[in-house]
Amino acid sequence: MEDVRPLKPWGQHRLSDGQTGGRAEEGDRAPEPNGGWATTLARMATSSAITPDPAPEAASPAFGTATSAAGEPRARRSGYRRLPVQQRREQLIAVALELFGNRPPEEVSLDDVAEAAGASRPLVYRYFAGGKQQLYEAALRTAAEELTSRLSVPAEGTPTERLAAVLNRYFGFVAEHHTGYAALLRGGSVVETARTSATVDEVRRAALRQTLRYLGVREAGPRLTLLVRAWISVVEASALSWLDEGRQIPQESLCAWLVDEFVAMAVAAAGHDGQTARALAALLALEPADGSAAALVAQLAPLAQSARPAGAGPRAEG
């Protein structure tokens, strides 16, 4: 026997999680007296806005202008407005990224995202049926793409100036997304998965590629690769410490120190690896003779020489 359920009054219907009907979410609009629905349908019929799945958000052009049975104006739902599908998805990701960037991911709920976006919880599920985890991974991918775009080395300036410019953009991102950045790199978050870890590793690989391109190296040997990876780890650890200490060191000063750290590590590695020695020599050849990089090498070379055992020959390989 067919199960016939009584109809519920308007406002008691709820969309299930992930449902993609064209009907508005609960509370988005109420029926309008005096031909309000006819007006709405007429406007919908003449509308040229056609969007693909998921279903477009229900329009409410007359919402807020209709009157109640008592003749009083209905209250407008604050913050709700219709957006095209792609624009709404991008907005939800941007809002989530802002929340995840300033609070630990486990402290952000879908209700928080919906409220900040001026949308409903079912609407968030319409775009991210996997819930908070799917939304977090989408926000993380967006952040990773933005961070990767900041790793491109500018064409102008000396090698150390160009590297400092990249670091300044990197630390600008760290400052903008401080809490999310710290939670991401430290790990242990309840939303951390193999996919989120892979996203972070891809950023590190992009940093490796950009640094090797900056050095003019197409095929890096194991020692030069180890040098660059170790320096990237120093940058990440410095960023976390910088956040923990309340950013007491000015950002430009910190970036300049990390550039010197790279040069110093390269000088040490050059004594063990011919490829690193050649890359460092090519880099220094483009620096002014009275520049900071040349001065640093001049200070380090005697120290490195005095630290070697007497009679020791060249150690560079490759």
Image (spheres, rainbow, N blue to C red):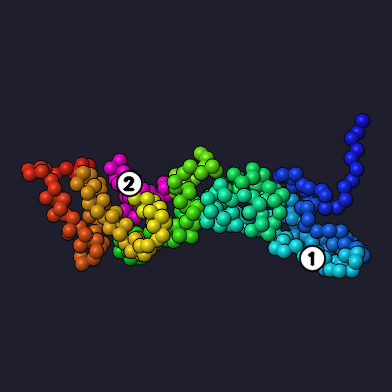
Q: In this image, 57 relative to 112: left or right? A: right
Q: In the structure shown, which secondary structural element does the residue marked by tag 2 occupy?
A: helix
Query: Is residue 224 within the magenta segment?
Result: yes
Q: Between tags 2 and 1, which lies in front?
A: 1
Residue at the (89%, 69%) spot, across then down: 71
Q: Which residues are magenta?
A: 204-233
- Residue at (42% x, 56% y) in the render: 243
Tell me if 132 is positioned left or right of 233 in this view.
right
Q: Is residue 259 above or below residue 105?
A: below
Q: Is residue 308 magenta?
A: no
- The amino acid at mark 1 is Ala
Residue 155 in the image, given as x and y percentages of width and height: 37, 63
Residue placed under numbered mark 1 in the picture: 75
Report the amino acid beneath label 2.
Ala
At which x and y percent is residue 151?
42, 56
Horizontal arrangement in the rendering, residue 314 relative to residue 128 (left or right): left
